[in-house]
Amino acid sequence: MCFAVTSLELVHLINKSGTSAERGLLTAMLHSSSTPSYLDNEESILAAAQAGDSDAFVSLLSVYSRRVYRVALNLTGNHQDAEDVLQEASMNAYRAIAGFQRKSSFYSWLVRITINAALGKMRQRATWKESSLDEPRDGDNSSYLPVEIESWFDDPEKACLNVELHQILANVIQKLDPKSRAVFTLRDVEKFSTEETADVLGISIPLVKTRLFRARLNLRDQLTEYFGKDRRNAMQTSRR
Amino acid sequence: MRCRQVVDKISEYIDGELDPELVREVERHMEHCEDCRIVVDTTRKTVEIFCHADPAPLPDDVLERLNRMFSLQFRTGGP
């Protein structure tokens, strides 16, 4: 039995289940570690969703909801806003799926909707300014120079627990300005191309490159505080 | 090429989007500049760490509320 059929059956059961305990169990099964990060037959599921099949839509969404939540969390910086964005973006996508033109992948389209919802939330919170004096001009890379010059220890990803790494990455990305954060999230976390990123955010390609440059160097400086060889040696020495 | 020019081109260099002649200049500079080698190496590692990181798990209660929202929507009508 292929994943999509199993998933659809589970989604159906979740929607029909009476108790929250049942729903929790079925939801856990749907999102268990065996769940792939894609659908083998996404094309047919997408077609069904566009034809009005609600279960097909939820099945599609279930594959991407974790990544949508990550985008929302990276942009808004807190779990409550990220959940609001996830709900709003999911419902907006559900209402608009019939009109999806397929000029991009379903995920790119879903992320575009998520970004719009996140920007709306950030504007409410006044964390997104339409213009900023410290915003770099197009092509102006020279406004950022590295502060920390220090080698990192080998395999920093393996050196800390997964939970620790998530926490470190979440902390440092929140210290970026919101616009650089949005570009970095799309380009280096969600692996969008420069052109797609520019398109989704409605900015020029040179501006994507400038913001990406600043974000990468800023994050590098911040991560050196965690992964720098000298600091680690100093920490180990002080523990002895 | 000076250090500042290397830093300015660092993003395009690690993305492989730099003109081959400039790539040679960057690499010539790095042969004798340890600071730039470190900055390039750690910038590349920065991108790789974020690129390889799995999304944090979606909290169960968040997922449950999302499913509940759709259940309600489906009971009350289509899109």
Image (tube, coloured by chain):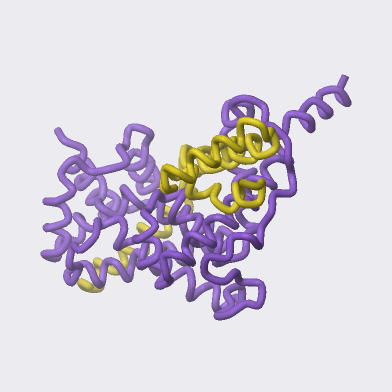
Chain colours: A purple, B yellow
Residue A82 in percent (x, y) is at 51, 61
Q: Nearer the viewer, residue A135 or A53?
A: A135
Question: Observer-nearest residue: A208 or A233?
Answer: A208
Please tell me in which quadrant of the rendered image residue A196 appears.
Answer: bottom left
Which of A72 and A131 lies nearest the eye of the viewer?
A: A131
Which residue appears at 59% of the width and 78% of the height? A129
Position in image of residue A195 (x %, y %)? 35, 61
Residue A37 picture location, percent across and down: 32, 41
Residue A20 visible in image: no
Res A177 quadrant in image: bottom right
Which image quadrant: the N terminus of chain A? top left
Q: State the residue in front, B50 or A95.
A: B50
| Res A126 → quadrant | bottom right
Q: Position of residue A108 (x, y in %)?
A: 31, 58
Q: Is residue A65 left or right of residue B13?
A: left
Question: In the displayed structure, would residue A104 be above or below residue B45?
Answer: below
Number of marks: 0
Asked if residue B12 is positioned above or below residue B38 in the image, the reply reads below
Q: Residue at x 66, y 51 (%)?
A: B4
A101 relative to B65 in the view: left or right? left
Q: Can the viewer see residue B37?
A: yes
Quadrant into which the C terminus of chain A falls: top right
Left or right placement of residue A184 versus residue B35 in this view: left
Residue at the spot x=59%, y=60% of the render? A141
- Residue drawn at x 40%, y 49% as measured from the top left: A191
